[in-house]
Image: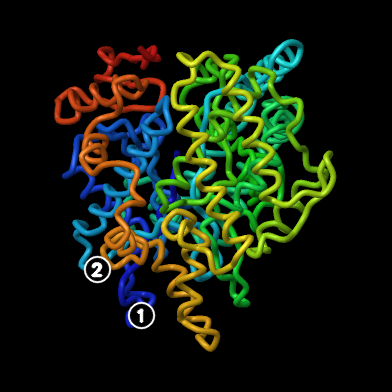
Amino acid sequence: METEYATLIVGSDQIEQKDLPASHKVYSALCDAIRRDQPTVAGVFDHEQLFLANGGAVTFESHPTMHSNPGGFIEIATPEVREPTELLACQKSIDALATDAAADSLTGFDIRILKNSSDALGHVYGCHENYQTDVASGIWLLIYRGFILLLWAMQVISLVISLPVMAGILCVILLCKLFKGQTVSLDRPQDLFESVPGWLSNPLLGVLRCVHLPTVIVLRFVARHVSFRRQRKYLTAFLVSRVAICGTGVLDPSGRYQLSAKAMAIDAVSDMGGFKGERPIFVHGHWLGQFCAKSFFSLASTKQMFGRKQRFQIGLSDSNLSDLAEYVKVGSVSLLLDMIESKHRAKLPLLKSPLKAIHRIATDWNLVSRVATNRGEMSALDIQKAYLSAAENFVASVPADLRGEAPQVLIRWRELLNAVLAFRKDPSDVSDAIGRVDWLTKRVLIDELGTDAEWAARKKVDLRYHELSNDGYYQQLLVTVPGIRLVENSEIERRRRSPPSSSPAARRGWLIREFADSEEIMQSDWGFAVIGHGRQRRRVQFTDVQHV
């Protein structure tokens, strides 16, 4: 799970814009606090990225030209795990790490962390889910590998063309710095852009994007027509309808309440996600980074793209506070991916117009809207019931000793769905939903303000619900309703220090603890680490640890 956390300065309405800390300063302060918490090393491809001893990673989510602006996001990813229970514990440990880093940061400001999906200005962010699954099979796997081979060749061509373009950009930057009498330092590449006026830097970056445009076109074709065809076909209706039980809710600028800000921002089914600002359900932006960014450093890292198992990323995912919603969100998808790979998918509903369906469902918190499917018109809850029933039949067909956590996933999935069904039948019946269904819990808190409440007061509830401090409304709810917790504090603290032993991240975490304070420099990526200097520099692959 990759989660983007927003930073909030308490009392910022009383501070002039120019006096607010730059987003990069906030990120650096948070990273310093995290370094004091546990051993860390820098990333191989992004030296400002931190890989943690707990197996996770911290990344600055901001364009280099905006590092001096206030605000910004910090993205923290959990380590790779094999079971939903492990992911829930790791995600909660990441939440706690972000919260404590904000409290311990040395900026002179009272920084808070928000785990939500949109801010008061309408900017949409949140989280991405990542799964390992078959990218294709049969003839489609051969076609996929053919395109990867083509893209590999295009990498080389793009690299050759990009070098003089990058050299030209660097020359312009250096000339601007010399003209302004500024010192030149390559230690912080993001600072290089600050000396170049926007009217000049934007065209230069545009030229670089044009160099990669052919690669993007091919990647977009692969994303839309070749990769993960079965998963996209049979999961789309589930994900679209999932906002009814796992959405976190949002109050829009016009005062309308919606189930999910992420859902309202979706404008494509499968795409890059970021090259032109598009927001797809299924995201291939990490492929864009592989072929258009990492290719500058390591063409060999593309080799893993030929594998049958690939990273399958879902962008239609809210940043949940509820343990139950967080667990069901990832547990249900994991179970459905197993079901799809096992070819148990005959009766799953298919949407006729996914984008229209997602916007229709997300704008109707009364849950009465119906959307067109291959089984006639269905509501979001009807679709969820169909998937749950199919998953129950699938699990029943699997030998008991091979089911793993699947029975627990089904129990909690039905619990979450029943809580929303109870509200649908009787709007006053929200007792089972409080603290478990994020969008409905938040809706109840907003309604308690009364119908005459101003938009600003209602929006405050919307935002403070997601604040990860003792002042956050959901955190206060945890104190009054402790039964909504699904993971013990002891397990959260353990996962804050180290990844599960069955995780591929176990070796990465061990190496980070060994080399973080060593004279031998270590840099890490998700699949490998680079240790040492010069001729002594060596690459260490993180071998996938088999589950025992």
Q: How many marks?
A: 2
Q: Nearer the viewer, residue 460 or 220?
A: 460
Q: Whole-percent x and y of residue 417?
A: 56, 48
Place residue 282 in its image quadrant.
top right
Q: Can the viewer see residue 534 in this picture?
A: yes
Three-letter residue code for mark 2: Phe
Residue 432 appears left or right of 480: right
**Residues at discs 2 and 1 in contact (Cβ within 8 Å):** no
What SS does tag 2 mark? Answer: loop
Q: Is label 2 or label 1 in front?
A: 2
Q: Whole-percent x and y of residue 148?
A: 66, 19
Q: CA distance from mark 2 to mark 1?
A: 13 Å
Q: Residue at x 21, y 57 (%)?
A: 105
Place residue 235 in its image quadrant.
top right
Q: Residues within 10 Å of mark 1 (few under 14, many from 20)?
A: few
Q: Residue at x 58, y 61 (%)?
A: 423
Q: As drawn, which residue projects farthest toward the bottom?
A: 452
Q: Nearer the viewer, residue 474 or 134?
A: 474
What SS does tag 1 mark? Answer: loop
Residue matched to label 2? 109
Residue matched to label 1? 16
Place residue 309 in its image quadrant.
top right
Q: Whole-percent x and y of residue 481?
A: 32, 59
Q: Give the quadrant of the N terminus.
A: top left
Q: Can the viewer see residue 67 in this picture?
A: no
Q: Whole-percent x and y of residue 83?
A: 42, 28
Three-letter residue code for mark 1: Glu
